[in-house]
Image: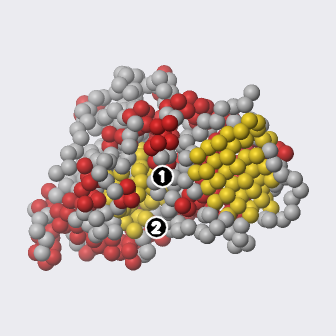
Amino acid sequence: MQRRISLIPQPQQLTAADGELDLGTLGAIVADGPAEATELRSLAWLLSDLLNRGTGLRLTVTENGAVEGPVLRLRLEGERPDDFTTAAEAYRLDVAPGGVELAAAHPAGIARGIATLRQLLPADALREAPAADPVVPLVSITDEPRLRWRGVMLDVARHFQPKDFVLKMIDRAWLHRLNVVHLHLNDDQGWRFEVPSRPRLAEVASWRAATKIGHARDEAAGFEPTPHGGFFSVPDLREIASYARERHIMIVPEVNLPGHARAVLAAYPELGAGQEKPVCPTFGVFEEVLEPTQAALDFALEAYTAIGEVFDGPFVHIGGDEVPMTQWESSPVARALMEREGLEDVRGVQAWFTKAFCDHLRGMGKRVIGWDEILDGGAPDEAVVQVWRSEAYVKKAVAAGHEVVTSPEPFVYFDHYEGEGPEEPLRIHGLTTVAKVAGWEPVPPGIDESKILGVQCQLWSEYLPSPKDVEYAAFPRLAVLAEVAWTDPEVRAADSVLDRLGDHLERLHAMGIGYRPLEGPEPWQQGGTGRRERFDHHFVEHPAD
Ligand code: TNX
């Protein structure tokens, strides 16, 4: 019996025919493009490898050479669109009795089509060793994403996530036709990448001596005195960068300054207001920030240079969220800066940092993205604003002339609870069910859609201590978000993603992902009554002022 076609995200246009094609009957993968298309060749070998792993099939890659009989053809055709456009990710995929043709104008489109082809195979073909036949239904797909930026953020700062998990998440983003993996690389609780000229970041800022047990608001629960840490060396970062590049996933590295600076200041206290405090063992918003000195600015620019060189994508995230003004209000250095620069209020101090970061990164050929607080004191027009506090800030950012990545907490903060049951494991607060994500329309009414670069979900890891916990929080909500980002609203409305989720969970299972079952956590995923017990801290939405 033919399997029903059930893809996430739903392609924009799909026509199915009766019958299946056995890829075992194909002679080769043909990389059909200009001779210099090394990206196409590398995708062809990647596809060959993936098919081999899950089905045992061994298809060699040839270039335009004569191959007898049916083939799997990857074809680059037409004029190459600019990078990071929806046209660059468009593709056509035809599976016919005479072979497979996947065509696109840009290698990124081929990469997206490969993701769709992998979902057309049986779920078990997503395993690491042969466990399924290489059969795909006959189908004709024409597809292009609705939005340019479709991302997921991993917070490797609150709890370090090992490199192989980051690579896995890049693969999973790829399979869902996401194109951005945002790495939140530093916070009060740790700094997670090597900057060779600043050795104390690795030595001191990359680990903490203890971690809060339970919720940060649950003071009675105390601390676990086991050190927690880790950081990516420069070669680790290079490996992550090239792994993502081959799959046409953009890494957006975030170095979050001038706030959330406790780890930096534990290593280099002279960059702050002088307190000597350890890397933070608990979670929240802390008042320690960089002082607006030349030395602190030089540090920041050195960190941005280091990360901007390793990750060659067009964006660097500067953070900028939750910067308390308390220290600057009483700082003679901040006061002197305000007088010198004619800043009206203390929020101008953050704007001073933001502008310096933007100028520096512009000089490196990069564009800056920052959390929506960069709007409070003002930011250069070219900075992209990542709205998180509430959708009201989308309007504010667009009115101020910025492009927006929209990530409102109630819909795409996947560190929020997924269900109301007492068995859910400890989360920060909130309630973001699969149905809530599925029902979300990312472009608020009255907003010019061309100003919305895209959407992104967040996996803040205060309460996600291990990859297992991150997987539970990410899946299957990430799949639903991928469809919200990719598929046009009319197409989404015609066939609810919720009806395809059951089939998709089989894929997640085949990949060994510890997802949350739709009906609630498995016994071993529950919070129980111990350290991971549910703690209901009230979620407060931030109104736009
Ligand atoms: C707010 S979103 C934060 C993070 C926390 C998150 C927890 C943002 C830019 N700042 O520091 O981890 O809430 O949900």
Colour scheme of the rendered structure: secondary structure
Query: Is any atom of residue 469 visible in this view?
Result: no
Quadrant in which the N terminus is drawn: top right
Query: Is any atom of residue 378 visible in this view?
Result: yes
Q: Dot 1 corresponds to which residue?
A: 146
Q: Is residue 118 above or below residue 241?
A: above
Mark 2: which amino acid?
A: Pro
SS at mark 2 in the image? loop
Quadrant assignment, res 510 = top right
* Ligand 1 is within 8 Å of the C-beta of the residue at disc 1: no
Residue 224: mark in rendering = none
Q: Is residue 94 above or below residue 520?
A: below
Does residue 246 appear left or right of residue 371 in this picture? Answer: right
Residue drawn at x 39%, y 77% as measured from the top left: 363
Q: Dot 2 corresponds to which residue?
A: 314
Residue drawn at x 89%, y 56% as measured from the top left: 68
Does residue 161 appear left or right of residue 18 in this picture? Answer: left
SS at mark 1 in the image? loop
Label 1 environment density (alpha carbons within 10 Å; few <14, some 14–19, many ≥20): some
The residue closer to the viewer here, 345 or 11, is 11
How many numbered marks appear?
2
Does residue 102 appear left or right of residue 486 in this picture? Answer: right
Q: Are marks 1 and 2 in contact (CB under 8 Å)?
A: no
Q: Position of residue 13 (x, y in %)?
A: 58, 46
Does residue 14 appear left or right of residue 472 in this picture? Answer: right
Residue drawn at x 67%, y 46% as measured from the top left: 140
Label 2 environment density (alpha carbons within 10 Å; few <14, some 14–19, many ≥20): some
Q: Position of residue 540 (x, y in %)?
A: 23, 38
C-alpha span from label 1 to label 2: 20 Å
Q: Is residue 495 above or below residue 24?
A: above
Residue drawn at x 14%, y 64% as measured from the top left: 346
